[in-house]
Image (cartoon, rainbow, N blue to C red):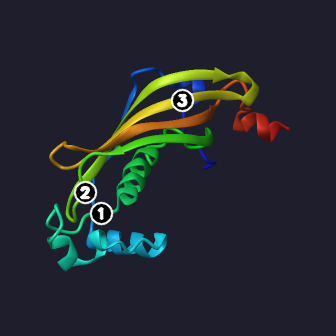
Amino acid sequence: MPYQQRGKYFEEFEIGQEIFSPGRTITEGDIVNFAALSGDWTQLHTDVEYAQANMFGERIAHGLLGLSVGVGSLVAQGFVEGTVMAFMGLEWKFTAPIKIGDTVHGVARVKQKKEMKAAGGGIIIIEARILNQRDEVTQQGNLTMLVKSKSASPTVSEKVAE
């Protein structure tokens, strides 16, 4: 069976439309792997003794780990699969720690749309929140993406016919 695109075209996004992701529990392994990948071995994330004396009383996940997992879980829902042309920007706030054992999930809402015919699509601004298992917002902000227009994108059958 040929690939079936799941992503929405620019015209298919509606202001106020929401996307939800399933939960994912953050583990000690996630933190260690992220530290190794990023090179960020900050003691707040990796040193139990240091972290116990900190304001959180324990190790917490890197803020960018939470951002990556949360936004990644939203994108995995397929709403821009095959239609996103560029990730253009990020405005983000880290409002509460993500701790080992916390289960996070994402909630996104289409905030704005702006057609960009010359680019073959339009800009979508997504307002996203990463929540923990108690529905507390741990991170939030706006993601700006350039998404293909349906009229500028040939279908698979049109491509095959060429």
Count every numbered label the image shows and give the total: 3
Q: Is residue 152 left or right of residue 142?
A: right
153 or 148, which lies in front?
148
User: What is the distance, in whole Å, between disc 3 and disc 1 at their CAs?
Assistant: 29 Å
Of residues 54 and 77, the one drawn nearer to the viewer in this rendering? 54
Regarding residue 5, the answer to whether it shows in the image is no
Residue 124, visible in the rendered structure: yes
Residue at (49% x, 23% y) in the render: 112
Which kind of residue does numbered mark 3 sit on?
Ile
Which of the two marks, 3 or 1, is nearer to us in this view? 1
Q: Do tag 2 and tag 1 residues touch (Cβ < 8 Å)?
A: yes
Q: Earlier in the sequence, mark 2 or mark 3?
A: 2
How far across and how far down the image is residue 118, in percent? 76, 25
Camera-near label (2 vs 3) is 2
Residue displayed at 16% across by 61% down:
55
The residue beneath circle 1 is 61
Residue at image location 25% in from the left, 64% down from the top: 60
Q: Amino acid at mark 1?
A: Ala
Can you tell which quarter of the image residue 34 is in? Answer: bottom left
Q: Which residue is identified by label 3? A: 124
Image coordinates for residue 35, horizontal then vertical, percent: 40, 72
Look at the picture and state if 110 lies above or below 81.
above
